[in-house]
Amino acid sequence: MAFVSGSTAFGIFDSDAAFASDADRLVRYVAVKLGGGLPGANEDATHVQVELTSKDVYTCFEEAAIEYGAIINAYQAKSSLAAFLGSLTGTLSGGQGRYPRNALEWARRQAQPFGEEAYVGGDRQLFSGSITLHAGQQDYDLQSLIAPTGSDGLPARMVIRQIFHFSPFSTFRFFGTTSAINYLNGQFNFQSFTPESVFYMLPVWEDVLRGSQFELSNKVRRSNYSYELHGPTSMLKVMPVPAQDNTLYFTYNLMDQSTIPLDPSDSLSYGVSNVSNVPFGNIEYSKINSIGKQWIWKMTLASAKEVLGMIRRKVMTIPIPGGDLQMDGSDMVNDARGEMESLRGELRELLDSMSYDRLAAKEAEQAESLMRVLSGVPLKIYVG
């Protein structure tokens, strides 16, 4: 009886024409390799002449194909998991056998907390607030004055990010390597210059650095405005003592947002998070090349050998005229398991040498070797 759909345990590859065709061939292959011989002309062409049925071989064949795909997918995930993190899981299938595009999503997500500390990005909401500074009062309890609440409606502790308390700028001053007269001429288009005019070509960053230098100097060296922030309730002490009522502005985060690693509003939290939900399904048998199919066939034989050994060791001896027939079931099981582990080791060793990081290292080694080879080529002598 030829292979028909439903002959395997899970039916994963039953609709694959290539799998169905190879299944019948493997029945003959296993029969010969296990010493059963080819079926005769008057015998069932799909029945193994040992203690195995065709369905036993079909099931071993399916198991070998599933295991091959699982090992390949595991190493694919090992090489490219960072590219899949945060992407849609979908039906947990569709990503197998594809070369992913590196979107750097993992690196961006890891860098978000550091960017937030530098005020350039982040995933936490930044709030702004203000309090009134009263004349003669230095100390203020920001937590009590603002009384923020978290997403659950309960009181939340503030994490102060910035306080805008510095000496106000009453004038703007311009400094440069050129004279003040020439600066005004250029700004107001006077279209005339003194005879001693000197022009400089300066990079823009030089102006930016000079402006930052004077701004920082005014805040640090020429200002007595400062503050202290301490305590779990964000107690603020401002200096100098306010001479009149004024408004102080600041920014802050909420502690409940800063301590929750999973944000329900973040869609990426529901995407791929680890190897268990990477969208890798079973690899189609018809799309496996000769290298993979040879491994699957050998694993099918080893698995069938294990099944046959387990059947035979149920009865260790069979009485026959003049003595007992010793069954080799235990030896077959041990041999089969050794062969299966050897096949797994060979495949893993091959895949280890072909992971994306190993390929990148090999490319670098080849480029370096090529440069050493080319360095021995004599240079041409130019004759003018």
Image: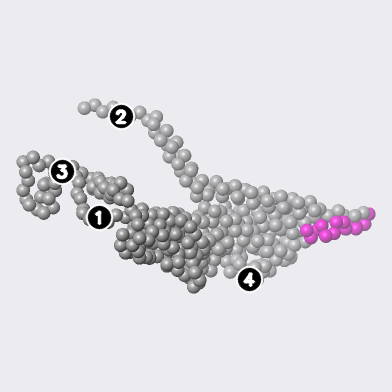
Using the rendered view, name the quadrant where residue 57 is placed.
bottom right
- Name the residue beneath numbered marker 4: 5
Q: Residue at x 73, y 61 (%)?
A: 48
Of the two numbered discs 4 and 2 in the rendering, the one whose residue sits closer to the viewer: 2
Q: CA distance from mark 3 to mark 4?
A: 88 Å
Of the two numbered discs 2 and 3 in the rendering, the one whose residue sits closer to the viewer: 3
Rate crowding at label 4 as few (under 14), some (14 to 19) or many (20 or more) other CA atoms within 10 Å.
few
Side of 193 where 71 appears, left or right: right
Of the two numbered discs 1 and 4 in the rendering, the one whose residue sits closer to the viewer: 1
Q: CA distance from mark 3 to mark 1?
A: 24 Å
Q: Residue at x 45, y 64 (%)?
A: 143
Is residue 49 something one can see in this rendering? Answer: no
Element under disc 2: loop
- Name the residue beneath numbered marker 1: 169
Earlier sequence position, callout 1 versus callout 4: 4
Earlier sequence position, callout 2 versus callout 3: 3
- Name the residue beneath numbered marker 2: 380
Earlier sequence position, callout 3 versus callout 4: 4
Element under disc 1: loop
* Residue nearest the viewer, comparing 145 with 8: 145
- Name the residue beneath numbered marker 3: 178
